[in-house]
Image (spheres, helix red, strand yellow):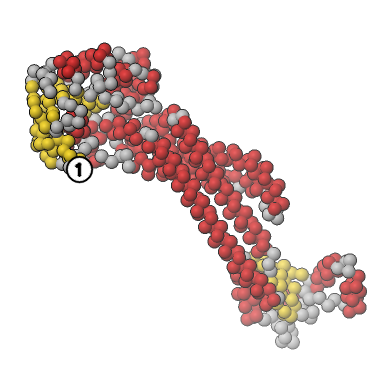
């Protein structure tokens, strides 16, 4: 009975709130829009960093006498390492075909290759780590357990890590710094928007402070006074979240193609569509929680004797 | 029923009440009169535990109200119906809902609310304004709704702070008549006023306060300042 009354009272207060309800919803909409933008920004950052990370790999070249079975055995061992995201095998024949394709317009190089006779290119394994900082440990593993041929010599010709190390290290630092700065930006903007929402809800409740005083004097318990304000706050948040979710459709559709061309394939509209349930739950929860928590904090000061 | 025992209330160095001792018996109608700033409202605030005394004790039915923990205050306040000069209706609730709110707060059932609120609206002669919001009512109508809210839970005491302060003479007369009727039905009534006409119309006990002290206590309804 009490729960039903609190719900009804909160809903009526919201509906009858007029300009105060509208202003609170508007500010909450701005707050949740910022939170939605931060979700997209985080996704964009992860996508971009992921794309860059995917372009980095370490290649292991094998001597021409190494058999495919030996190389595939090593590939199997490397794939079992927890740091490894993927290993791609390129045979000597594939490497040669690829080389010819790349230099199809360069007759001089192709002629030199023909004059060499046979296939001078090595078979290789391209290794991608889950994190660029983990390449060193993968290379250490390869160097510590060299694969040997039948005559006892190593079948690994060379590993291109040494010449790529500087670039990989710098990239690792840059990626880490970007992630940390991105996180800081997200936290700062999220906090700022939450504070704005808090201030607005507080202002809305301030306009009802006399009403709260009357409720106390007619003998309403603190919980019974707080309840409807809590419900109103939650409704405000949920309505604002619904508005943001609706607005995001045309906005992401409009900028989707642009983001795809600017950020190497990241289409914000496709991301929104693909992650709609997640974003729906995130914004609805954030709206309801913000409204509820802001209401509780705002009303507390008016409930003392 | 009510006993103020040497009550002093100070705001900083200024004393709003100074050593006030006063008792009110059940079913009495007491008018507290005095100039603005004499301490009338402070007296009622202490009774409603909106304020705590600096010195002395306030008793209601032999219980020192200052000993009540905050968590018990709402139970205590349900025993007292309050009426204010500025009506203090909840602006986004209709006349019906304003009266019903006091019952809801007291934990009364929906059936009780559905049966009692229309009866009270009839009693204060505002049955046709049940769905009106406070800003759609006149001052007199607002005050009658406030009185309806004050008596809906059949309190033992009704406290009215300048209940006619914002009303014209006709509405003042109506409100006084309603308060007298409430008292005749057995409820203790304490009002503060500086309206001589109200005191004369009530014709009951008058307590005069001046600069925070009780200076007169007459049983016969005299308004002397």
- Outermost residue to the bottom: A151
Nearest the viewer among B90 and B209 is B209
The residue labelled by disc 1 is B12
Pinpoint residue B14: horizontal percent, then vertical percent: 17, 39
Using the image, determine if residue B179 lies above or below residue A52.
Answer: above
The residue drawn where x is 61% and y is 68% is A172
Nearest the viewer among A166 and A61 is A166
Using the image, determine if residue A17 lies above or below residue B198.
Answer: below
Q: How many labels does the image show?
A: 1
Pinpoint residue A28: horizontal percent, then vertical percent: 49, 41
Task: Specify whether B197 is left or right of A49.
Answer: left
The residue drawn where x is 91% and y is 70% is A107
Nearest the viewer among A117 and A237 is A237
**Looking at the rendering, which quadrant does residue A222 occupy?**
top left
Name the quadrant of the N terminus of chain B.
Answer: top left
SS for tag 1? loop
Mark 1 neighbour density, 10 Å: few (under 14) some (14–19) many (20 or more): few
Pinpoint residue A247: horizontal percent, then vertical percent: 60, 39
Q: Is residue A81 visible?
A: no
Task: Specify whether A157 is left or right of B6.
Answer: right
Name the quadrant of the C terminus of chain B.
Answer: top left
Nearest the viewer among A29 and A289 is A29
For disc 1, the chain is: B
The residue drawn where x is 49% and y is 47% is A193
Task: Specify whether B222 is left or right of A301.
Answer: left
The residue drawn where x is 14% and y is 33% is B212
**Looking at the rendering, which quadrant does residue B218 occupy?**
top left
Q: Can residue B201 be seen in this view?
A: yes
Task: Specify whether A265 is left or right of B223.
Answer: right
**Looking at the rendering, which quadrant does residue A223 occupy?**
top left
Using the image, determine if residue A29 lies above or below residue A73.
Answer: above
């Amino acid at each position: 009975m009490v729960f039903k009354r609190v719900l009804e009272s909160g809903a009526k207060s919201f509906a009858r709130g007029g300009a105060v309800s509208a202003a609170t919803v508007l500010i909450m909409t701005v707050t949740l829009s910022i939170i939605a933008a931060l979700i997209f920004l985080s996704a964009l950052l992860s996508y971009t960093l992921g794309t860059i990370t995917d372009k980095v790999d370490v290649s292991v070249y094998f001597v021409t006498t190494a058999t495919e079975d030996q190389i595939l055995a090593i590939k199997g061992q490397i794939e079992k390492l927890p740091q490894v995201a993927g290993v791609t095998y390129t045979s000597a024949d594939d490497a040669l075909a690829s080389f010819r394709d790349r230099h199809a317009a360069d007759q001089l190089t192709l002629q030199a290759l023909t004059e060499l006779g046979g296939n001078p290119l090595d078979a290789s394994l391209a290794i991608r780590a889950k994190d660029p900082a983990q390449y060193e440990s993968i290379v250490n593993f390869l160097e510590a357990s060299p694969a040997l041929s039948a005559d006892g010599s190593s079948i690994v010709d060379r590993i291109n890590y040494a010449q790529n190390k500087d670039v990989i290290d710098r990239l690792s630092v840059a990626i880490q710094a970007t992630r940390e700065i991105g996180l800081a930006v997200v936290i700062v903007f999220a906090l700022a928007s939450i504070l704005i929402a808090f201030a607005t809800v507080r202002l809305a409740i301030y306009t009802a402070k006399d009403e709260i005083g009357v409720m106390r004097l007619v003998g309403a318990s603190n919980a019974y006074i707080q309840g409807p304000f809590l419900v109103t706050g939650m409704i405000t948040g949920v309505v604002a979240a619904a508005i943001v979710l609706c607005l995001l459709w045309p906005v992401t559709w409009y900028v989707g193609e642009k983001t795809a061309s600017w950020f190497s394939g990241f289409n914000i509209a496709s991301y929104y569509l693909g992650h709609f349930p997640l974003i729906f739950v995130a914004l609805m929860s954030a709206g309801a929680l913000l409204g509820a928590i802001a209401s509780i904090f705002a009303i507390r000061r008016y409930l003392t004797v | 029923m009510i006993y103020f025992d040497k009550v002093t209330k100070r705001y900083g160095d200024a004393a709003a009440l100074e050593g006030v001792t006063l008792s009110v018996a059940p079913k009495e109608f007491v008018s507290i009169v005095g100039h603005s700033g004499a301490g009338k409202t402070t007296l009622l605030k202490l009774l409603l535990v909106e304020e705590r005394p600096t010195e002395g004790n306030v008793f209601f039915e032999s219980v020192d109200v200052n000993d009540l923990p905050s968590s018990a205050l709402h139970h205590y306040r349900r025993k007292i119906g309050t009426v204010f000069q500025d009506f203090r209706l909840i602006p986004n609730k209709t006349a019906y809902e304003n009266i019903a709110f006091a019952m809801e707060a007291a934990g009364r059932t929906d059936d009780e609310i559905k049966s009692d609120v229309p009866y009270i609206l009839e009693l204060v002669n505002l049955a046709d304004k049940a769905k009106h919001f406070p800003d759609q009512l006149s001052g007199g109508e607002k005050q009658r709704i406030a009185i309806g809210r004050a008596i809906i839970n059949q309190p033992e005491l009704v406290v009215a702070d300048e209940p006619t302060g914002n009303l014209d003479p006709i509405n003042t007369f109506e409100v006084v008549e309603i308060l007298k009727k409430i008292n005749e039905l057995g409820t203790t009534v304490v009002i503060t006023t500086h309206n001589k006409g109200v005191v004369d119309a009530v014709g009951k006990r008058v307590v005069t306060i001046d600069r925070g002290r009780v200076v007169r206590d007459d049983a016969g309804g005299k308004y002397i300042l």
